[in-house]
Image (cartoon, grey):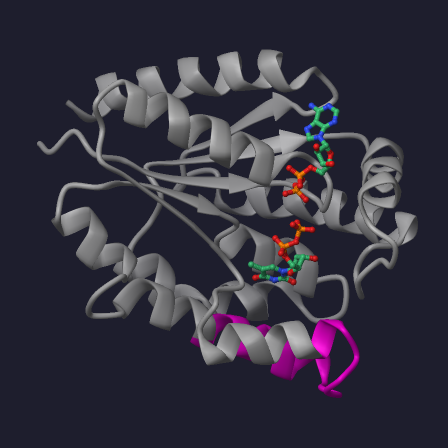
């Protein structure tokens, strides 16, 4: 069994995913792993189109947005050079800041969750994370962090929406718990506490994979 992992980090906006993705990347590379840090939406043109919808430059229906995320994800998985499958084949441990659980949680505020799971099925068949780590931070705390960090908030960044998205994450975990490896960490803790907990989860995941 190869000892490289595919790790997905999930959480509502401002929960600390990017911070933890960076810290985990540093930790794993210091321990001698070849690592590849990546995120969704991607920098591919489909990802850029998605970002232009979020900044209200482009109008799109919520079903269309969910479908665009599937297209972006498929390219992310299948790209010949930098695709997740290719990177894993080359022995990289992949840390992915958001993956398909983001779709289940965010789009099902507007459209049926089972439909979102259905259209993402091809992605789950191509590659499932060895572990999905959900950083569970309080929506009020996340809103405050986002306000401190940025001048303008994006499409989904209202308190009401963050609360709904958090609930949807839990609903999707419940639906898929028999076929996915999911762990939840307390995102209200300090960056160092969360990083230590994630390090321990990754050690455990490596042990079970070997
Ligand atoms: P996300 O990628 O989930 O949106 P970020 O990692 O960008 O979140 O973090 C959002 C903001 O909150 C950043 O300004 C970051 O420095 C800060 N932050 C991240 N983790 C914590 C934490 N555990 N405690 C306090 N602030 C944090
Ligand atoms: P991201 O750049 O990760 O935002 P942040 O750093 O603030 O967490 O993601 C941009 C937005 O895209 C975020 O609000 C969540 C949303 N999103 C979806 O709606 N569906 C998806 O499948 C993914 C991956 C992200």
Q: Which residues are magenta?
A: 53-71
Q: Quadrant of residue 11?
A: top right
Side (left or right) of 209 relative to 139: left
Please give the count of numbered marks on the rendered protein: 0
Q: Quadrant of residue 65?
A: bottom right
- Residue 48, percent from left and from top: 56, 75
The residue closer to the viewer here, 58 or 119, is 58
- Residue 53, percent from left and from top: 70, 78
- Residue 159, percent from left and from top: 90, 48
Magenta highlight: main SS: helix
Query: Measured along the vertical axis of the image, is residue 197 above or below residue 206?
Result: above
In magenta stretch: residue 139: no
- Quadrant in which the N terminus appears: top left
Side (left or right) of 53 relative to 129: right
In magenta stretch: residue 64: yes
Q: Quadrant of residue 125?
A: bottom left
The residue closer to the viewer here, 72 or 49, is 49
- Residue 83, percent from left and from top: 27, 62
- The residue under the point 14% across, 22% down is 210
The residue closer to the viewer here, 198 or 111, is 198
Rendered-image quarter of ligand 1: top right
- The residue under the point 79% across, 79% down is 56
The residue closer to the viewer here, 114 or 25, is 25
Query: Measured along the vertical axis of the image, is residue 134 above or below residue 75?
Result: above
Side (left or right) of 61 relative to 173: right
- The residue under the point 82% across, 55% down is 157
- The residue under the point 29% across, 54% down is 127
Query: Measured along the vertical axis of the image, is residue 188 above or below residue 4?
Result: above
């Amino acid at each position: 069994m190869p000892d490289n992992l595919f790790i997905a980090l999930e959480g509502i906006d401002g929960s600390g995913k990017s911070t933890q993705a960076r810290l985990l990347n540093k930790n794993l590379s210091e321990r001698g792993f070849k690592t590849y840090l990546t995120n969704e939406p991607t920098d591919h043109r489909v990802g850029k189109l998605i970002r232009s919808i979020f900044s209200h430059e482009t109008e799109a229906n919520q079903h269309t947005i969910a479908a665009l995320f599937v297209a972006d994800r498929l390219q992310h998985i299948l790209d010949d050079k930098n695709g997740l499958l290719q990177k894993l084949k080359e022995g990289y441990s992949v840390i992915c800041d958001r993956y398909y659980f983001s779709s289940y949680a965010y789009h099902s505020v507007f459209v049926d969750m089972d439909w979102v799971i259905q259209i993402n099925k091809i992605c789950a068949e191509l590659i499932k994370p060895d572990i999905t780590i959900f950083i569970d931070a309080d929506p009020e705390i996340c809103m405050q962090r986002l306000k401190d960090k940025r001048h303008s908030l994006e499409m989904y960044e209202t308190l009401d929406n963050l609360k709904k998205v958090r609930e949807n994450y839990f609903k999707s975990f419940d639906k898929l718990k028999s076929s996915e490896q999911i762990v939840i960490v307390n995102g209200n803790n300090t960056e160092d506490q969360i990083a230590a907990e994630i390090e321990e989860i990754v050690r455990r995941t490596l042990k079970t994979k070997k």
